[in-house]
Image (cartoon, grey):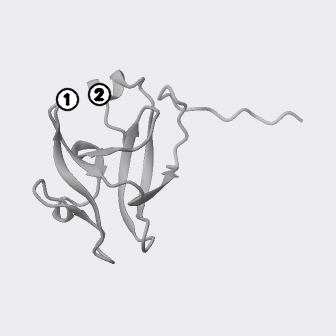
Amino acid sequence: MKFSNDKFKKNRGGYSRWLKLNCEKCKHQVLLYQKNGPGILKRLYFDRINTSKNTLSKNKNLICQKCKTVLGVPIIYQKEKRLSYRLFAGAVEKQIFKTKSKTSPGGRKTKKCPKSP
């Protein structure tokens, strides 16, 4: 998986991480999301969601496929004119999803130091 590099990421300090979002009620995995910058998760921008496009719609609520709980509603974030879901408080639980390649916060790959004898 590759991080999306654009002006929004650069405006938030260039720091990204993958979050695995689960339904708080039934613990079912809903999607993977690229979170840029520090702070709480209030919105899910459509261009940062990493899932099959068949399960998401710009006009439909974000719903858990297993228990049918509504997790968020679609909005246009006026500050940036971007389509997103506004999450309901406490609707999802998040975990940082680690990829196999190790990268530093600046986006550079880290090298393992050889062990000293």
Is disc 1 in contact with disc 2, using a CB cutoff of under 8 Å?
A: yes
Name the spot of residue 58 as percent of width and height, x first.
12, 53
Q: Nearer the viewer, mark 1 or mark 2?
A: 1
Q: Is the residue 105 above or below the residue 28 in the image?
A: above
Q: Residue at x 89, y 36 (%)?
A: 117
Marker disc for residue 80: 1
Residue 105 x, y percent position in the rendering: 52, 30
Q: Which residue is mark 2?
A: 8
Across and down, in percent, residue 80 comes to: 19, 29
Q: Is residue 57 left or right of residue 116?
A: left
Q: Is residue 54 above or below residue 44?
A: below
- Mark 2 or mark 1, which is nearer the start of the sequence? 2
Left or right for 47, reference 112:
left
Q: Residue at x 29, y 44 (%)?
A: 48
Query: In the image as oriented, which residue stretches furthest toward the right?
Result: 117
Residue visible at 32% across and 77% down in the picture: 66
Is residue 27 visible in the rendered image? The answer is yes
Residue 26 percent location from the top left of the image: 43, 74
- Residue 1 in view: no
Find residue 52 and report its image quarter: bottom left
- Could you say whether the residue bearing mark 1 is in a helix, strand or loop? loop
Q: Secondary structure at mark 2?
A: helix
